[in-house]
Structures are given as structure tokens and as C-alpha cells.
Image (cartoon, rainbow, N blue to C red):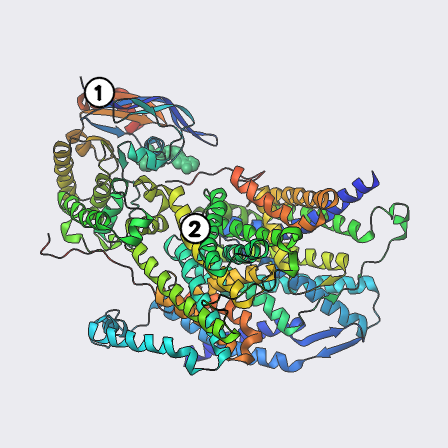
Amino acid sequence: MSRTILDINDFSMVFGGLRAVDHVDMHIDEGEIVALIGPNGAGKTTLFNCVTGVYTPSEGNITVAGPNSEIIRTNGKKPNKITELGLARTFQNIRLFSSMTALENVMIGRHPKLKAGIFGAIFRDKKTRDEEERVIVDSLKILKKLNLAKYANEPASSLPYGAQRRLEIARAMATEPKLLLLDEPAAGMNPQETKELDDTIKRIRDEEGLTILLIEHDMSLVMSLSERIYVLDYGKLIAEGSPDVVKADPAVIKAYLGE
Amino acid sequence: MKYFLQLVLAGLTKGSIYALIALGYTMVYGIIKLINFAHGEIYMIGAFTALIVGGALQITTGLSPLTILAISLAAAIFFSSGYGVTMEKIAYKPLRNAPRLTALISAIGMSLILQNYVLLAQTSDFLPFRSMIPNFPFLTPGKSLVTTTQLVILITTVVVMVILTLLIKFTRTGKAMRATSQDKVMAQLVGIDINKVITFTFAVGSATAAIGGVLIANHTGQINFYIGFLAGIKAFVAAVLGGIGSIPGAVLGSLVLGMTESFGAGYISSAYEDVFAFIILILILIFKPSGLLGRNEIEKV
Amino acid sequence: MNKIIQEIKKSVLSALWLMILTFPIMVIKVNSYEGVVLWRWKNLMWIGIGTFFLSWLWRFLLDRKENGPGESKPDADRDGKFSLRKALGERKVKIPTLAVLAILVLAFPFMVKFYQVGIMTSALMFVILGLGLNIVIGYGGLLHLGYAAFYAMGAYTYGLMYLYWGLPFWAALPLGAVSGAVFGIVIGVPVLRLRGDYLAIVTLAFGEISRLLLENMSGFTKGPEGIAQIPRPGFFVKLSLQGATTYLFYICIVLVLFAIFVIRRLEDSRIGRALEAMKEDDIAAQSMGIDLAKTKLITFALGAVWAGMVGVVLAAKTTYINPGSFTLMESVMILVAVVLGGTGSIPGVILGAFLVTLIPEYFRALADYRMLMFGVALVVMSIFRPQGIIPRVRKRYLVGEDKS
Ligand SMILES: Nc1ncnc2c1ncn2[C@@H]1O[C@H](COP(=O)(O)OP(=O)(O)OP(=O)(O)O)[C@@H](O)[C@H]1O
Ligand SMILES: [Mg+2]
């Protein structure tokens, strides 16, 4: 039995009068690919935002396994602290650093793994120079992993849409996460690109030993990738289990098809 | 006790003036999310217009003070609104889709332009402003406590607020304004002409600021080209204090600010009067950025 | 033809409107002491004529901005045409240019009249201030309107420490830098949560509070009268007025070079990239592990350091400081230099600082119109050229094909 790396307990998020996420329990174990699905406005992105520290959860506990398997409560922690704990994410409405090149975007992702401070920058000692050389090499490697090497010197905003989505993944991977959270990685992709993404996600999971939680509307991708699925509807968890179980669940069918 | 009451009245008077200016900030911010840095200048121009028009009438005609007051107030409202609307067309409209900081820099530029325009076309000195508000004899018993001008300021502010509230609640344009401030895209979809709403907002905001300008000039008895800066900043503080975008908030914030300044100056030290406003601004933004009556919004990610 | 008539109509309408609008302020002048009213009808005519043409130009420029200039291709000057930037980048041109420039700069104090040296020193001080503010606005994307407070901090560090302890210039210079940076952080902490325009207003508030405190704590700071007779720096021996001024000129040159060096190194580093990321998208940056609070404080400190140093130089140059030198207008002027020259661009900011200080200095007739022109510059630049006169060329990290 592998250890749990993300545990969400009785968690809710309230905006003004709206309960966007309502008493949800979830857990992700090491090495899994888990999908989080649900109709538009179900609260999926909100859950991501709370897990990654962009919002502070209104109620409940979110815990993450620390470097020595200790359990760390992340409610109210800053996003960068959570990134340092090994969580990294992509954004549904792409938030690349648009005037930077693809390579530079990934270099930003390396930030928490680098050391140089102000004095390193000004005096540019040997250590800093080595680090700067390494970050370019490492970033290029990551770009290659996601088939983005040919765009390395292109500004992120000029990349084709599918490539921008992959660049978001590359940038997140640069932080060397344990758990990668992907918010609709296939949105706007054509079937060909989606198929490639499917392969890429499986490959990086195997090569890097990643755990993945993904939000996705493309059901074929969800069914192909995920080992477990959670279904949210109006903020409530309405089903959970293997793809086959979820597919057959009447509550899920009702949520998607309406009455 | 009398000193206390005097401070209360002074605070209310100040607060009223701030409120008349703060309305413009808050309405404009509600609609185009811009801190109209030059709004204080509109208030200054209102005061100047009244001084010029009133002065010219005083010298060249034999009209009664009240008639002159009415005409110069009307002129101030007309011209201030004109400046407000024109300023929007020139300096802000081309920047609607630009980054907000760019628009803010343009607004700072506009503020410099208007200040120096008045300085160059008129003077850099303080000009005496002969009060046009007559003394009402029926006030004599309370005279040592409240001046006629103070009373006029308070009453005018209340009347303006009532009219404005009615305007926004019940007229078509008012409803369009509210719709636009809630969701610009939706408002456009249902056929609201955003340009018209923005023009109207600037016109109304400038008009109330002009009234504030005329009143304050009558109250303090002198004006110069720079009075808009500090008053503008303070009214902005008031708007933020009340919750920017909220009209009742702007009024509440202004009164709180006016009182704080009045009591701070009265009991602590008048040298630090301006510091209080800035300290309030900093505290509110740190501890309750949405202000007293504003909605607490979390940016969607 | 029809279009021209249309345009004429629009221009006439604009002119009429502005003539009405500016009528009371431009035409009437009341002298209530003597009871006379001055009617300056000529002004009205100028407004009319001016608006007619300017509004035409304005619409033309707006139209061009929205629909592009039409014929000229964006890549045209990259390939065929001569590009100054490219030429300067070449070794063969760059080294002689720099050499000539260096000789000119070094010889400057001996080539011109003495008072010119003073003016140029002020311009150089402004260059350093611009470069400092540019770190905050251009790299960090944080609009700081209280920058003059850091400048004041430096000046008063020297002024007060001299007053109470007799501290010399060379000890004050590093201390001014440190106190600038510390003050940058002190003001930075409370505003960490604020963004964009709110940040601008609150920093403005802090700037004003600082000045008001300097004015009101008369016991300690000497209040509005300020501190006088602060010594100029000596060069082993006490220098004459001319000597000291020339000396300060060279000190400023060194400081400018030092600032450029530091800023260029920062740009090309992990910290610089973090600033850039924060400017582009602070939420994404944070999600990439960048500590926003720390990065913002670093930005403020790095920006304020320079103002602190220039403050010390100011105290030494004028030998007298008072709170009146550190008003909001000072902050705004530095902002104008940055925005006019090119936000984020080192050559741009240098040019901007020279323009802002030297134009009113050498065109005395324009001095009265200085602030009006700066206002116009801010509006016009925001609308037509937000990237400034010399736009920034970002340092790019690129990889060659062979490396991959
Ligand atoms: N910052 C916010 N402020 C107020 N309401 C919000 C905020 N963020 C999300 N919401 C609301 O919370 C609900 C859930 O939104 P969320 O974005 O989490 O849905 P989602 O499941 O990701 O939908 P989609 O599939 O369309 O991306 C929606 O009703 C949304 O309007
Ligand atoms: Mg979503």
C-alpha cells in the first residue's frame, strides 16, 4: 500500500453566499493518476486553487506528506510554500509569462531549486555561473520531454495553443513536484494533440515517478489516463471510484445529462 | 462640551466636502476600475470657475449675492462636468484596454496638466474668495456653534446625496450604471451603451465635485490651483475607507475621515492633521482592503 | 474629399467645444482688490486655432495606432535599413564610441563654464534616481509614488549624522544607501498585499507622511527650515567650491556606471527573472515557487538604495536640505523620466532623466511650462508610446541549435 500524499478532509470553500466546494473528502496516493470531473461550475478549479494555496480554504483540512513523510497542514500557506512541498500546477486559462520565451518560462519554474541571491547576481561568482549554466541545460531537457525544444526561443504568447498547454506542464515540472495538478490540460486541443498528450502524461508519470491529479472534460482522455475518478457537482462529491464504476453511476449520469 | 460639538460640526462639514468629491472617485472606479487621479483637479476647477464667474458678476453687475451664487454654482457644475467628460475622452478612453498602470500614469499626467493650466492661465497665488452665502438671521442663537456656511454645506450635501441615490435607483441611466459596474460584458450584451454610461458617470461625478469646490471656497475664503491635490487624495482615502465602488460607502467613509481629522486636530495636534488621513488609508488597506461597506472580492484564478 | 470635410467638421467642433470649456479660466481674470475684470479674448483665439490642428493630429495618431501605419513592415528596419542599435552592438563601432564618450565625459568639467558642471551633476543625479525607480517600476512592475521619501532618507542621513556627530561625506554615502534600502523595506512590508493602483496610492501616502514628519519633528530634523552648512566632500584637502563641484560630478559619473553595472547583472540573474515573472503574472509566479513578499521587498530595497545614495550627494552638493525638496512632485518627475525614456530600458531612462532636467534648464522660456509639459508627456506617452522613447530590449536567454 503506497502512502497518501494529498489528503483533503471535510473541505469547503465559500465565496460570499456561494458554497463552491461543499464538505469534500479526497485523497491521492503516491504514483496514482486521479481525475477530478464534473460539470461547469462544479468547483473543480476552486478545489485546485485551495490545494495550491491561491485561495485559503473556508473550512476543513488539507494536508500534504512532507519530505520525511510527516503530515503537513497546508491551509493558509502561501502558494510558493506549497510548491516547495512538492505540488505544482497548471492553469485552466493559461497563465504563462507571455513575453518570455518558452525556455525562460521553464527557467522560472526552476526558481525554487536554485540558490543564487542578490550578491550572487552582482558578483557572479563561480557557483552562480555554474548554476546559471545548469539551469539552461536543465530547462532545455524539460522542454524536450514535452516536445517543446523547437519552441525554446519563441515567446510563449506566439506558441500554438496546444504547445502553450504543454509549456504550462513543462513549467510546472521544472519545480520537480511529487504531485502534479493539471487543470484541463487538453482544453482546446484537437484529437491528434489530445492523443499525444495522453501518451506524454503517461510517459512523464513513469519516467519521473509522478503522481497526477487532473481536471478534464474530455472523457476519453479521462478514461484512458485515470486509475481513480472523483466527481463533483455543485460543490459536492457525488461519486468516486474506478473509471468503470463511475461511468455506470446513476448519480453521475444524472449530473451530466440533467434530469 | 461646546468645543466637542464644534469639533463634531467641523468634522461633519469636512466630511461632507470629502463625500461630494469621493462620489466621483467611487462611481468612476465602479465603472472603469480606474483611480481617476485628476478628480481632485475637477473640484479645484469648480471652485475657480465659481470664483471667476462670481467675481466678474459682482464687479460688472448689480445682482444680489444669492443670484450670483446660483449663477456661479451653475457655471461651476457645467464647466466641471465638461472638463470631466473631456478628460475622459482624451486621456482615458484610448486606454480602456491598456494595462491599468498605464491608465493611472495617464491620469497622473492629466492631473499635472489641469493644475498647471489653471496656474498659468490664472495665478499661483491664493485668491480671496468672497463668501456669497448670506448670513441667515434665524441662526443667531446657535451662531457661536455653527456658521451659516457650515449649515449650507451640510444641507446641500444631504440634498445632493438624496438626488443622486434617486437618480441611480430609479432612472434608466442609473440602472445602466449599476449594471455596468457589476458586469461590463453582460451590460454590453443586453444593449447598454457603455460609452454613454461612462460619459454620464464622469459628468455626474464632476458635478458633485464642483458643488464641493464651490462650498469649500465659500467656507475657507481662499483658493489656489493646488487645493485639488490634497482634497482629492483625502476623498480617495474616504472612498477606499467606505469601500470603493459603493456610494453609501463613500459617504460613510468621508464622514468618518472628516471626524477623525477634526478630532485628531482638535485633541492631538493640528500639525498632523493630514497625517491622520494617510494613516487611516494605510490601516484600512492593510486590514480591510474592501473597506467598511465594500464587497470582499477574491480575484478569480 | 469627403473625408477631409468630415475631418474639418470634427476639428471645428472640437475647437468650439474647447473654446467654450476654457472660456472662464482662459479669458476672464478677476482682480477683486481693484474691482476690475480682465477679458483676454486673444487666448480664446489661440485655444481655437490650437485645438483645431491638435485635434486633427490627435485623431490621425489614434487612427494610426489602432489600424497600424499601413505600408511599413515591422521587420523592415531589422534587415535592410541601418539600425543604430545594431551598429552600436558591433565591436568595431562600440569600442571607439565608448572611448570617445569616456573622454568627453572626463573632459567635460574643463570644457564648459563652471555652472554647467553643476547642472550636469544634477542631471546625473536624476539619472541615478531614474535608474533606481526603474528597478521598481520597470522590472518589478510596482508603481511606487513615494520614491522621493527614499531620496529624503539619504539626504537626511547625511544631514542629521553630520549635524549631531559630524559624520563626513564618505561615511554617509554607504550609510545613505543602507538607510534608503532599509526604509524601502520598512515601507514595503505594510504594502505587500497591495497591487497595482492601490499600491501606487499607498506609497504616495507614505511619501507624504515621511515629508510631513520631517516638517513637524522640528526638534530633531530642524523642521521646514532644514539643515544648512552640510560640508561638500573634500579630496584629502578641503576643496574650493569649483573643485568640490567637479569632484561631485565625477562621483556621480562613477555612481551612474556602478548603477548600470549592478542593474545589468541583476537583470541577468535568478533574482532578475523572478522580478520579471512577478511583473508578468504574480499568481503564476507564486505558483512557480517565487516568494512574492520577499521578491517585492528585494525590489523596493534595490530601488531605494540608489535614492539613498543620491540623497547624500544632494546634501553635499547643495549643502542645505529641507523637506521641500522631497515632495510628491519630485517623485512624479522621476516617474516622468522613466516613462518618457522607456520603462525598463537603461538607455531610455538615462535619456528620459536628461530630457526632464535639461530641457527646462536650457530652454528657460519653457521653464514655466515645465510641469504642464510633463503632464502632456505622461498622457501622450501612455496613449501612443507606452514603451517609451527607447524601448527596452529584454535580455533573452537563448539556446543554439547545436546545443540541443
Ligand atoms: N474568486 C471567486 N469569487 C467568487 N466566485 C467564484 C470565484 N471562483 C469561483 N467562483 C464560483 O465558484 C463556482 C465554481 O467555480 P470553478 O471555477 O471552481 O468551477 P469549475 O468546476 O472549475 O468549472 P469549469 O469546468 O467551468 O472550469 C462557480 O460558480 C464560480 O462562479
Ligand atoms: Mg475550472
> Identity of the amino acid at label 1?
Arg
> On screen, C357 above or below A51?
below
> On screen, B265 above or below C243?
above
Question: Ligand 2 sits in which quadrant?
Answer: top left
Identify the element where label 1 is drawn. loop
Lateral position of residue B104 relative to residue C84, left or right: right
Q: Quadrant of the N terminus of chain B?
A: top right
Q: Which residue was labeled with disc 2?
A: C300
CB of mark 2 near ligand 1 (< 8 Å): no
Look at 74% across and 73% down and name the residue there: C30
Observer-nearest of C62 and A85: A85
Identify the element where label 2 is drawn. helix
Relative image position of residue C91 (x, y in whole percent): 20, 72
Q: Residue furthest top?
A: A1
Relative image position of residue A219 (x, y in whole percent): 20, 32
CB of mark 1 near ligand 1 (< 8 Å): no
Q: Quadrant of residue B209?
A: bottom right
Observer-nearest of A44 and C146: C146
Lateral position of residue A128 relative to residue C199, left or right: left
Lateral position of residue B269 relative to residue C201, left or right: right
Q: Which residue was labeled with disc 1?
A: A3
